[in-house]
Image (tube, rainbow, N blue to C red):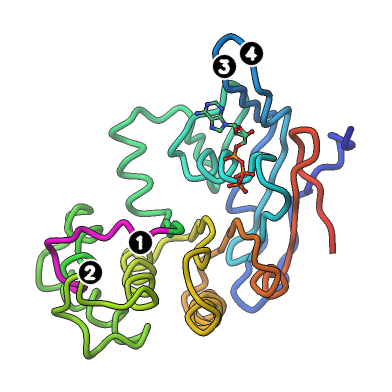
Amino acid sequence: MADRENQVPATTPRGPNETAGPLIQASGINKTYNHRKSPIVVLDRLAFALGFGETLGIVGASGIGKSTLLHILGTLDRPDAGELNYSGTDVLRLDDAQLARFRNKTIGFVFQFHHLLPEFSALENTMMPALVGGMDKKSAREKAESILVRVGLEERLSHRPNELSGGEQQRVALARALVQRPAILLADEPTGNLDRRNSDIIHTLLMELNQEMGMALVVVTHNMELAALVSRRVTIVNGALQEFR
Ligand SMILES: Nc1ncnc2c1ncn2[C@@H]1O[C@H](COP(=O)(O)OP(=O)(O)OP(=O)(O)O)[C@@H](O)[C@H]1O
């Protein structure tokens, strides 16, 4: 069993965008799925800390709980027990409406599949989180345009998802995730559906945007090239985090 006293301690700054003190601090996180009366313990007293601007990869075999952990960190799922603090805010105490607002402002998500709304253009999809967050239309449009230009899609603003390549769709999803300038981007196999060339483009963008925008990055990946780019790598052993080089 992993040494639970020494799981992933709070970190010190490692890069130009990292400041002292944790962005996320979690402890005692338990998650069990009760599947047809046979419980599956996925996370067991897991502890986790991440600094502002830090980049971290969650890697390892299928089924060890990587996506479960990412969903809990992203407040998309609640643990059965434990504490989860974002710069001092106890997010597990927030109700659903407060959590939705918190997520909109603080966390960007990218998944393996883009989940763009098919009837809306790249620009409209990217504006969506800003509009939902209460920004006026003109500012939302400006912010969305600027991030779409940054990810190289200035010629594709009016394209709908089915008028974009797979790599372009994922770049729109990345722009949408970052339009609110979140403190953290959570990515679950962001290049799992892409070929080598498009994966490389997304990997480079992730690392460049981390430097430029200062958002922290937690990425679940089987891609060893991406895992090599982040500053810390962890895996899950018996429900607890283990850090490795
Ligand atoms: N809703 C659920 N009900 C029951 N069991 C579940 C549920 N979701 C996940 N599991 C189980 O929990 C374990 C962890 O799942 P999770 O998706 O977090 O793994 P993972 O490490 O992300 O795997 P992969 O690399 O294949 O995506 C798996 O054994 C899975 O079968």
Q: Amino acid at mark 2?
A: Pro
Please, what is the dominant secondary structure of the magenta stretch?
loop
Q: Reply yes or no: does residue 120 show up in magenta.
A: yes
| The N terminus lies in quadrant | top right
Q: Which label belongs to residue 38?
A: 4
Disc 2 to disc 4, C-alpha distance: 41 Å
The residue under label 3 is 34
In the rendered image, residue 180, in percent from the top left (x then y), is placed at 32, 64
If you read the primary sequence from the N terminus, does the residue marked by circle 4 or circle 1 appear first?
Answer: 4
Decide: is 15 above or below 51.
Answer: below
Callout 2 crowding tier (Cα within 10 Å): few <14, some 14–19, many ≥20: many
Drawn side of residue 106 relative to residue 30, left or right: left
Instruction: Say which element carries label 3.
Output: strand
Drawn side of residue 15 relative to residue 195, left or right: right
The residue under label 1 is 114
Disc 3 to disc 2, C-alpha distance: 37 Å
Give the camera-side residue of 161 and 158: 161
Disc 1 to disc 2, C-alpha distance: 9 Å
The residue under label 2 is 161
